[in-house]
Image (cartoon, helix red, strand yellow):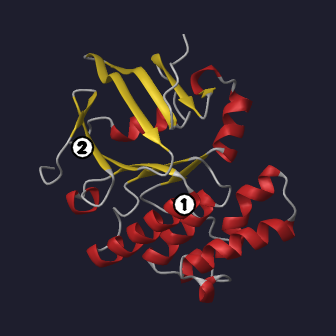
Amino acid sequence: MPVADSAGAVLQVRGLHKTFHSPTGPIHILNGVRLELSRGEFMAVVGESGSGKSTLLHVIGTLEPADAGHAVLNGRQLFDLKPKQAAEVRNREIGFVYQAHHLIPELDALENVMLPLLVRGESRSAARGKAENLLVRLGLKERLFHRPGKLSGGEAQRVAVARALVGEPGLLLADEPTGNLDEYTAEEVFSAMRQLCREEGAAVIMVTHSSHLAGHCDRTLRLHEGVLHASSVGND
């Protein structure tokens, strides 16, 4: 059953359920999650550790299957996709940023950011131009040819943000993207990511434990007992 269209919504999720099975019985992680995200909207998701925030991103991002529910991204039913189709959607329409940058250590910053475009089949010259433009906009002009081991934590995370956005996805899923950084660097990376996403028109769901950063998002939802609730930040 398709999800009804909502004007301006990039992502629509309805009735999302996910259960894990353990020796002591089923663990209901997501219990009918419902959300909508508009183009360019920056949403924070907060909640206790183990509440299912990362699982929510994994399911929306087609990295884990849902047990029930519907998710529509730009008119496409995500949970109906075959594995090859889902991989293509992840390459073209969804960007991912994690707490660890997951950069390839043998490649320099520019090559890491070019990679998703090369996988897509773009020419090296086109991929290089797009990657260099993003890295310069993120303040990394002097770090293009540095490998991850020669970058600071904040620099490496900005490279990861550039890699996630270089393919111009409509949706960015960010799982504790500043969790490994000190407070000052976290603020820098968050501000750069938010600015770039707004310029690119990407909608964002960011999982965070930081009430400070959540307070700078357009909207904050709290995941509690498998359901998303409107939240006033400062309580987590």
Q: Position of residue 124 (x, y in %)?
A: 85, 67
Q: Which quadrant would residue 167 be assigned to in this image?
A: bottom right
Q: Position of residue 198 (x, y in %)?
A: 49, 60
Circle 2 crowding by C-alpha within 10 Å: few under 14, some 14–19, many from 20: few
Residue 52 in view here: yes
**The residue tagged with tag 2: helix, strand or loop?**
loop
Front residue of 79 and 19 = 79
Left or right? Give the position of 145 relative to 44. right
Left or right? Give the position of 218 relative to 142. left
Q: Is residue 178 above or below residue 37?
A: below
Q: Is residue 75 above or below residue 131?
A: above
- What's the residue type where badge 1 is placed? His
Q: Is residue 217 above or below residue 38?
A: below
Residue drawn 56% across the image and 70% down it: 159
Q: Position of residue 17 (x, y in %)?
A: 39, 20
- Which residue is denoted by mark 2 in the rendering? 49
